[in-house]
Image: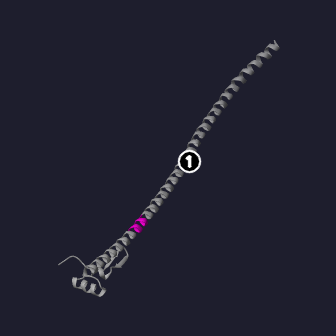
């Protein structure tokens, strides 16, 4: 049994086409002679006319197929351009978001580092102030004792 199915219906994508019944007909030589007689032609002229008609039909079908091919190719190109453009826009958005997040992370890290450094400077300043206050107290204590001794020495000299 043959695996060839004969049908006048062709389905491409979602569209169905019905081919002309002439494509599936087989014309016998007797039919060509009869056709030639009714049209007043020689059998060879009738056969040539049938062949020309078949060629025109074949060319028309090829032109339709080429036109559909060009349309589908243009649609595919348009779709691919749209997809690439959309992907580019998404990538650009992701890059801008990552840049903003990186900037914010860097900014926050810089603020935190600055606060840590400022805290160290303030702690060091307080430590220096405390040392200076202790040294001042010691100097005042030493100076007070020495001033008392100088005053006592001066009074003794005045009284002597």
In the rendered image, the residue lying farthest to the top is 160
- How are the colours assigned in the image? one colour
Left-right relation of 71 to 49: right
Q: Nearer the viewer, residue 144 or 110?
A: 110
Range shown magenta: 69-76
Res. 45 image quadrant:
bottom left
**x, y percentage for residue 22?**
30, 81
- Give the residue displayed 58% in from the left and 38% down from the top: 120
User: Crowdedness of circle 1 by 10 Å Cα count: few (<14), some, many (20+)?
Assistant: few
The residue pinned by badge 1 equals 108
**Quarter placement of the N terminus:** bottom left
Picture layout, residue 148 above or below residue 56: above
Q: Is residue 5 left or right of residue 101?
A: left
State the image coordinates of residue 154 (x, y, percent, origin top left). 79, 16
Q: Which quarter of the image is occupied by the C terminus? A: top right
Please state the total of marks drawn on the protein image.
1
Residue drawn at 67 percent across, 31 percent down: 133
At horizontal 34% and vertical 75% (from top left) the residue drawn is: 56
In the image, 152 versus 102, the foreground residue is 102
């Amino acid at each position: 049994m043959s695996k060839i199915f004969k049908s006048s219906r062709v389905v491409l994508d979602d569209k169905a086409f019905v081919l002309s019944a002439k494509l599936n007909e087989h014309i016998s030589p007797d039919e060509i002679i009869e056709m030639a007689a009714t049209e007043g032609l020689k059998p060879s002229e009738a056969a040539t006319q049938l062949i020309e008609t078949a060629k025109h039909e074949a060319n028309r079908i090829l032109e339709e197929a080429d036109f559909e091919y060009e349309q589908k190719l243009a649609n595919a190109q348009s779709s691919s351009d749209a997809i690439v453009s959309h992907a580019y826009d998404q990538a650009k958005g992701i890059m801008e978001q990552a840049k903003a997040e990186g900037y914010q992370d860097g900014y926050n890290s810089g603020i935190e580092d600055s606060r840590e450094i400022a805290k160290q400077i303030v702690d060091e300043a307080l430590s220096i102030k405390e040392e200076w206050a202790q040294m001042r107290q010691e100097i005042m204590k030493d100076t007070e004792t020495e001033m008392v001794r100088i005053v006592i020495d001066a009074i003794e000299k005045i009284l002597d």
